[in-house]
Image (tube, helix red, strand yellow):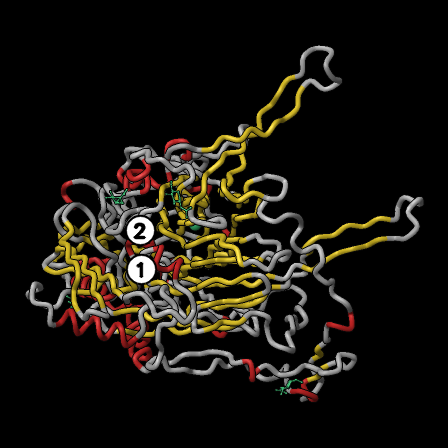
C-alpha cells in the first residue's frame, strides 16, 4: 500500500546491507531431516530422535561460487561484478551512473524453449536501468562479448524505481530543513523524535515534471516502533531528489494532535499488557519425517509430484515462475502450462483529495520493487518447518551485488483439505459401503514484501490435479490520518467519512489494492487462443418444456485484443479459457487452462484521473496481448512519475490479432479496503486468490489413482515430557 522507509528502517537496512556483504545463505539440506521413526508403529519422541526440540536454524551459505545452470537463472554475484566492471570502462557514459535495476536480460523465448539440459547456455546478458544527470539510460550488457551491446537514453515520462540512496538523500534534505525542525519544536517534539517516510509523488501535472520528486512525511517515533499509527498530520515536504532541495513545504493540521503510542506496540517481547483472554493452543505442526517431497535443483528448478518449474527472485516482481510444466499422469509427457508468471504491477490509490493525501496512489513494483522490499522470512511463523529458503541476489546503486537472505520459502502444505471424495452406501441396493477420499497436499512458493507500512504475502501453489493457485494476503500497518476526534460522536458528518476512526485520533483512510499479474500461458505449446465461454439464458417456447429458462455455454474465440478486454459481471458470467486449438483431447476438445477469478474489486476512479491514467492497466480485470518481450510491466518500464504513456491499456489499444498466437493473459486481483478497528495497530491478514485450472487438458481426473492416506503410513510425533 504505501511505500515508505523510515529513518529507523533506513538505518536497519544500512546495517542489513553490511550484513549482506558477508553473503550468508541459509538452506536446509536433506541430511538435516531427522528420521521421525523408521518403524511407524512407534511414536517419535524427542527422546528417541531429537526431532521436536531441535531448533530450525538455517545454515549460512556463500553465493560466491554460484554459477548459472539454466537460461533463466538470475545473474550471479560474479556476473554482476562483471557487468559493473564493463560499465566502469564504458566510455559513452561520462561517469558511473546510479544503477536502479540490474538483472538478467532473458534470452529470446525460442532460445529458452529450445534449450536442453547439457546444452551451452545462451549468451548471458544484463539489462541495466540507470540514471545519469536525471536521464534514464537503458543498457544491455553482453557478458559473453564483454561489452555494452545496446544503449538507449529514454526520453518521455517516467523514471526507474527509487533507490535506497534516493530515499536516504531525501530524508537527509528533509531533516536538515529548518522549517521542519521548527514545526517539530512547535508541536513540542524534537527533530530526533521523528520517524519519516518517503511516499512516491505520483504524477499530477506540469509542476512536478522534468525533475524527480518524492514526498517526505513524518510521524512520532518515540515510545513505540509503530510510528505509522502516529502521524504528524498535514506536514508534507516535496523533495527534488536529484537537486537535493525542498521544493514545497506544507504544514497544516497544527490543531490535530499526534496520536498517542498507547496500544500500538506489536512485538511479542515488548508487550506490557497481559496476554489475550483465550484458551492457549496446544502445539501444532505437520511432520515430514523423511523430509519434503519437493526438490530444488541447480538453485532454481523446483520439482514436486507432477510439477516442474523454474522459480527465481526478482528485484521488481518479487518472484518469477517460469517454464511451469505438469506431467501427464496417463502418458508421462511433461506438458507446458505457463512460460512465465509474475506480479507485474500494483496500484494502491488512497481516497482522500487532501493536500497531504492526494498523491498517495502507489505503484509499488515500479516505484519501489517488490523483491528489494521482501526481507527475510521468519522460520516457523512465515513458513513452516521443513521449508526450503531461497536467497535473492540484487544490486545496490553503485552496481555491487548483495544477498537478500531467505527471501522466498518453499514448503508443502497439508491443511487437512480434501483433494476429491465420494461416498456411497445410503442406498441399500449397493452391497458395499464406499467412502473414498484423498488428501490435498500442495507445494507453496512464498515471499512477503514490506513496502513501507504494508505487507504483501504472495503464494504460488501447485496442485496434483493441475491447478495453480495464486494467493495474495495483506497485512502490516494501515496508512492512517491524524484526526482531532477521539470518538465518532465528535465527528460532524459521521456517515460520510473518508475512512474509519480506528483508534483515538486515528483514521484509517479508505483505499484500494490492485495486483496485476502477467501470465504468459503456453498451454501445450506457444500458439494459443483466448476463448470466453459465456453463460447465456435461453427461454423455452410455450409448451416446449416444464421449464421456462435454462443456461447455455456459448464459446467466443477472441480475434483481437479488444475482444479480450474483460470487465467481470456477475449477471453476465463467463469462463475464460486459454486454449491450444491444435491440441485436442481424444474427444476432440481443445486442451486448455481457465482463469478462475476472485476478489473482484474494480477501480472506480475517473478514467482521466492522473493516477488512473498511469494505472490504466486496472481499467479491465482481464486483458490478452500478443507476446512481446518488451511488454512485461503493466505500468510501463519507467513507472516512477510516469504519465501513462506505456501501460498495458496503451499496448492493448493497438488491437493486434491474438488468435492462435503466442499470447499473454493479464489478470488484476483487487481489494477495496474500508479499514476497521481490528486493523489497528497491525492488520490481521486479508487474502484473496485466483486459479489457473486445467479444462479438457487431461483426459480425465488426473489424480484418480493416487493413494489415500493410511494410518500406518503416517508417523505420529509427540513432544516428549522431558528431553
Ligand atoms: C534416516 O533414515 C535413512 C533410511 O533409513 C538413513 O539412510 C539416514 O541415515 C537416516 N537419517 C538420520 C539423520 O538418522
Ligand atoms: C532545531 O532547532 C533547535 C532550536 O532552534 C536547535 O537547537 C537545533 O540545533 C535545531 N536542529 C537542527 C538539526 O537544525
Ligand atoms: C504459430 O502460428 C504461427 C502463425 O500464426 C505459425 O507461423 C507458427 O509456426 C506457429 N508456431 C507453432 C509453434 O506452431
Ligand atoms: C513490442 O512492444 C513495444 C512496446 O510496447 C512496441 O514499441 C513494439 O512495436 C512492439 N512490437 C510488436 C511487434 O508489436
Ligand atoms: Cu489496505
Q: Earlier in the sequence, mark 2 or mark 1?
A: 1
Classify 272 as above or below 182. Answer: below
Classify 60 as above or below 465. Answer: below
Mark 2 against mark 1, which lies toward the viewer?
Answer: 1
* Label at residue 629: 2
Tag 1's secondary structure? loop
- The answer to whether one can see residue 362 in this image is no
Q: Quadrant of ligand 4?
A: top left
Q: Nearer the viewer, residue 433 or 278?
A: 433
Quarter of the rendering containing residue 551: top right
Q: Nearer the viewer, residue 417 or 293?
A: 293
- Left or right: 344 with respect to 141? right
Look at the image and tell me in which quarter the C terminus lies.
bottom right
Q: Residue at x 44, y 79 (%)?
A: 26
Quarter of the rendering containing residue 189: bottom left
On the image, the x and y values in percent for residue 442 come to: 59, 61
- The answer to whether one can see residue 663 in this image is yes
Look at the numbered disc 2 and say if its residue's Cβ is closer than 8 Å to ligand 4.
yes
Tag 2's secondary structure? loop
Q: Residue at x 37, y 67 (%)?
A: 73
Q: Nearer the viewer, residue 215 or 695?
A: 695
Look at the numbered disc 1 and say if its residue's Cβ is closer than 8 Å to ligand 4.
no
On the image, the x and y values in percent for residue 148 come to: 16, 64
Classify 399 as above or below 353. Answer: below
Question: What residue would you read off at disc 1?
Answer: 107
Q: Residue at x 18, y 60 (%)?
A: 139
Amino acid at each position: 500500500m504505501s511505500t515508505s522507509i523510515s529513518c529507523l528502517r533506513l538505518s536497519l537496512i544500512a546495517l542489513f546491507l553490511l550484513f549482506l556483504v558477508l553473503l550468508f545463505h541459509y538452506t536446509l539440506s536433506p541430511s538435516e531431516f531427522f528420521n521421525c521413526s523408521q518403524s511407524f508403529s512407534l511414536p517419535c519422541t524427542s527422546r528417541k530422535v531429537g526431532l521436536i526440540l531441535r531448533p530450525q536454524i538455517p545454515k549460512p551459505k556463500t553465493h560466491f561460487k554460484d554459477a548459472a545452470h539454466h537460461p533463466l537463472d538470475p545473474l550471479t554475484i560474479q556476473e554482476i561484478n562483471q557487468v559493473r566492471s564493463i560499465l566502469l570502462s564504458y566510455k559513452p557514459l561520462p561517469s558511473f551512473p546510479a544503477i536502479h535495476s540490474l538483472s538478467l536480460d532473458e534470452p529470446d523465448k525460442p532460445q529458452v524453449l529450445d534449450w536442453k539440459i547439457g546444452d551451452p547456455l545462451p549468451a548471458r546478458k544484463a539489462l541495466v536501468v540507470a540514471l545519469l544527470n536525471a536521464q534514464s539510460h537503458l543498457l544491455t550488457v553482453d557478458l559473453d562479448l564483454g561489452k555494452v551491446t545496446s544503449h538507449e537514453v529514454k526520453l518521455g515520462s517516467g523514471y526507474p524505481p527509487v533507490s535506497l540512496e534516493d530515499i536516504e538523500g531525501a530524508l537527509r534534505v528533509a531533516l536538515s530543513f529548518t522549517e521542519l525542525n521548527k514545526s517539530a519544536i512547535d508541536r513540542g517534539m524534537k527533530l530526533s523524535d521523528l520517524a519519516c517516510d518517503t511516499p512516491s509523488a505520483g504524477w499530477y501535472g506540469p509542476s512536478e515534471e522534468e525533475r524527480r520528486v518524492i514526498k517526505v512525511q513524518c510521524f512520532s517515533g518515540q515510545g513505540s516502533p509503530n510510528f505509522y499509527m502516529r502521524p504528524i498530520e498535514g506536514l508534507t515536504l516535496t523533495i527534488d531528489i536529484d537537486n537535493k532541495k525542498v521544493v514545497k513545504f506544507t504544514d497544516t493540521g497544527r490543531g490535530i494532535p499526534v496520536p498517542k503510542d498507547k496500544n500500538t506496540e506489536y512485538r511479542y517481547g515488548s508487550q506490557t499488557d497481559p496476554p489475550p483472554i483465550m484458551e492457549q493452543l496446544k502445539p501444532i505442526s505437520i511432520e515430514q519425517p523423511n523430509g519434503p517431497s519437493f526438490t530444488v535443483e541447480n538453485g532454481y528448478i523446483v520439482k514436486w509430484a507432477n510439477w516442474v518449474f523454474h522459480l527465481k527472485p526478482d528485484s521488481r516482481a518479487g518472484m518469477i515462475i517460469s517454464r511451469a510444466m505438469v506431467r501427464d499422469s496417463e502418458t508421462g509427457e511433461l506438458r507446458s502450462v505457463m512460460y512465465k508468471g509474475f506480479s507485474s504491477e500494483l496500484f494502491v490509490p488512497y481516497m482522500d483529495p487532501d493536500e497531504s493525501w492526494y498523491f498517495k496512489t502507489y505503484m509499488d513494483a515500479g516505484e519501489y520493487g517488490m523483491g528489494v522490499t521482501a526481507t527475510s522470512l521468519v522460520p516457523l511463523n512465515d513458513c513452516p518447518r521443513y521449508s526450503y529458503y531461497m536467497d535473492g541476489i540484487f544490486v545496490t546503486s553503485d552496481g555491487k551485488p548483495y544477498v537478500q537472505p531467505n527471501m522466498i520459502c518453499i514448503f508443502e502444505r497439508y491443511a487437512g483439505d480434501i483433494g476429491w471424495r465420494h461416498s456411497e452406501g445410503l442406498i441399500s441396493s449397493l452391497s458395499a459401503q464406499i467412502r473414498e477420499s484423498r488428501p490435498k497436499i500442495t507445494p507453496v512458493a512464498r515471499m512477503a514484501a514490506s513496502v513501507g507500512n504494508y505487507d504483501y504475502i504472495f503464494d504460488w501453489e501447485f496442485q496434483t490435479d493441475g491447478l495453480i493457485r495464486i494467493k495474495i494476503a495483506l497485512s502490516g500497518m494501515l496508512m492512517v490520518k491524524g484526526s482531532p476526534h477521539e470518538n465518532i460522536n465528535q465527528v460532524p458528518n459521521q456517515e460520510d467519512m473518508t475512512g474509519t476512526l480506528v483508534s483515538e485520533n486515528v483514521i484509517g483512510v479508505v483505499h484500494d489494492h490492485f495486483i496485476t499479474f502477467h501470465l504468459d500461458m503456453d498451454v501445450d505449446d506457444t500458439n494459443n487462443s483466448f476463448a470466453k465461454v459465456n453463460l447465456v439464458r435461453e427461454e423455452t417456447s410455450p409448451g416446449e418444456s416444464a421449464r421456462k429458462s435454462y443456461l447455455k455455454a456459448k464459446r467466443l474465440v477472441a480475434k483481437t485484443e479488444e475482444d479480450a478486454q474483460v470487465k467481470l459481471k456477475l449477471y453476465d458470467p463467463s469462463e475464460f479459457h486459454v486454449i491450444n486449438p491444435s491440441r485436442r483431447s481424444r474427444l476432440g476438445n481443445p486442451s486448455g487452462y481457465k482463469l478462475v477469478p476472485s476478489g473482484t474489486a474494480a477501480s472506480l476512479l475517473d478514467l482521466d484521473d492522473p493516477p488512473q491514467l498511469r494505472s490504466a492497466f486496472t481499467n479491465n480485470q482481464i486483458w490478452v496481448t500478443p507476446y512481446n518481450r518488451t511488454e512485461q510491466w503493466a505500468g510501463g518500464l519507467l513507472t516512477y512519475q510516469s504519465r501513462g504513456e506505456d501501460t498495458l491499456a496503451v499496448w492493448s489499444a493497438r488491437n493486434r490479432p491474438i488468435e492462435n498466437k503466442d499470447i499473454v493473459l493479464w489478470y488484476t486481483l483487487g481489494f477495496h479496503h474500508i479499514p476497521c478497528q481490528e486493523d489497528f495497530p497491525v492488520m490481521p491478514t486479508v487474502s484473496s486468490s485466483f486459479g489457473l485450472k486445467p479444462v479438457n487438458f487431461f483426459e480425465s481426473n488426473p489424480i484418480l489413482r493416487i493413494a489415500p492416506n493410511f494410518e500406518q503410513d503416517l508417523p505420529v510425533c509427540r513432544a516428549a515430557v522431558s528431553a
